[in-house]
Image (tube, helix red, strand yellow):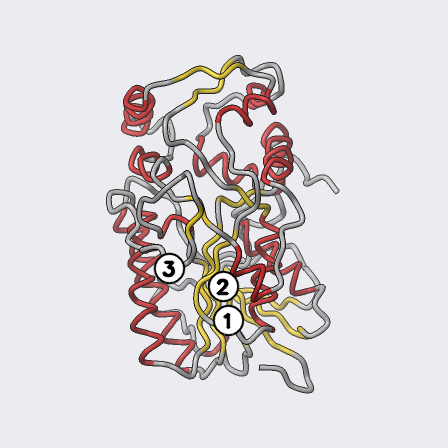
Amino acid sequence: MSNDRGKRVVVFGATGNTGTSVLRALGEDPDVTSVVGVARRIPAWKPPKVTWIRADIAEEADDLVRPLEGADAVIHLAWLIQPSHAPVTTWRTNVLGSIRLFEAVAAAEVPVLVYASSVGAYAPGPQDRRVDESWPTHGWPEAAYCREKAYLERVLDAYEGEHPQVRVVRMRPAFLFKEQSAAEQRRLFLGPFLPRRLVRPALLPVVPDIHGLLLQALHTDDAAEAYRLAIGRDVRGAFNLAAEPPLDARVLAEMLGARVVRTPRIAARSALAAAWHLRLVPASPQLFDAALRLPLMDAGRARDELGWQPRRTSEETIEEFLHGLRHDTGMDTAPLVGHAAPSG
């Protein structure tokens, strides 16, 4: 909702991979005059237009309505990936906390809610063609991440019927990467035991080629631009966000100067399951199962209705991320902190 004073936007999960990019995008938008960044831990980072508020969507003692008063839009990005061994903990934040926030948006009479769904909400699908936003969002039920994303899709189906005055937009991005998220994503998915030197070109001898492993990637800054556009455009519903081309073992091997080695899916999963049960890696084998079954997304609706186009290819995005991974690059926020300062 635009007005003479400009837009006031509240961003939950403002200090993470997507949140930091969204704050930068909003800071560059002349139609946005005020941004409230909501996070569990207030950072030292001070981006333009941003006022920080500490709140946790999972804590019932935290008032979620007051930060929303007078807001023109809410962007909900807050999400827990870990601990993967404690699905009740992630459910409490991701599902119950999100429902609390949705209810607060309606109570505060905020006209726009932009929610970060995911490709992980989609049911298993084809990899030989693209699917649009009508593909079923049942997720992969064994993976907590997918189960939670799919559940919230059903919650929002009901919410839109109960609160038609709220314009709800659901973003379904591909896997998001940027240089400054490398330290965080290393902790969330790879764990502390992967030597950083192995992701240098020519030092990783082989890349496993696993049947079904074909992923779409997107630079987080490009995803943030879609969130910014969704606030100002009169659009509703879901939008797929992905860059080209899809990434397979061959593309990754070329980036790393490695050989492709065909690897049976069951062998790769068994090794990951053993490492996960021993708590050597944080990523669960169920999430691995889900990743092998994800459909390829068609981002045509975002191009046509939002006027959105990614500025970077998926290959450029991964090249940047690998550079950050080698240097343990992060940012001055609690989720993204690393041992190396982010490069300009």
Q: Element at badge 2?
A: strand
Regarding residue 265, the answer to whether it shows in the image is yes
Q: Nearer the viewer, residue 129 or 100?
A: 129
Crowding around mark 1 (Cα neighbors within 10 Å: few <14, some 14 to 19, many 20+) is many
Residue placed under numbered mark 3 in the picture: 134
Cα distance between the residues tagged 1 and 3: 24 Å
In the displayed structure, does residue 189 sit left or right of residue 161? right
Residue placed under numbered mark 2 in the picture: 12
Q: Residue at x 48, y 23 (%)?
A: 194
Q: Which mark is residue 192?
A: none
Q: Residue at x 57, y 63 (%)?
A: 304
In the displayed structure, does residue 132 sit left or right of residue 217? left
Q: Where residue 148 sits: x, y (%)? A: 31, 54
Q: Where residue 284 sits: x, y (%)? A: 32, 35
Q: Residue at x 64, y 31 (%)?
A: 323
Q: Label 1 sits on what residue type?
A: Val
Are the two marked residues, 2 and 1, in contact with CB atoms closer than 8 angstroms? Answer: yes
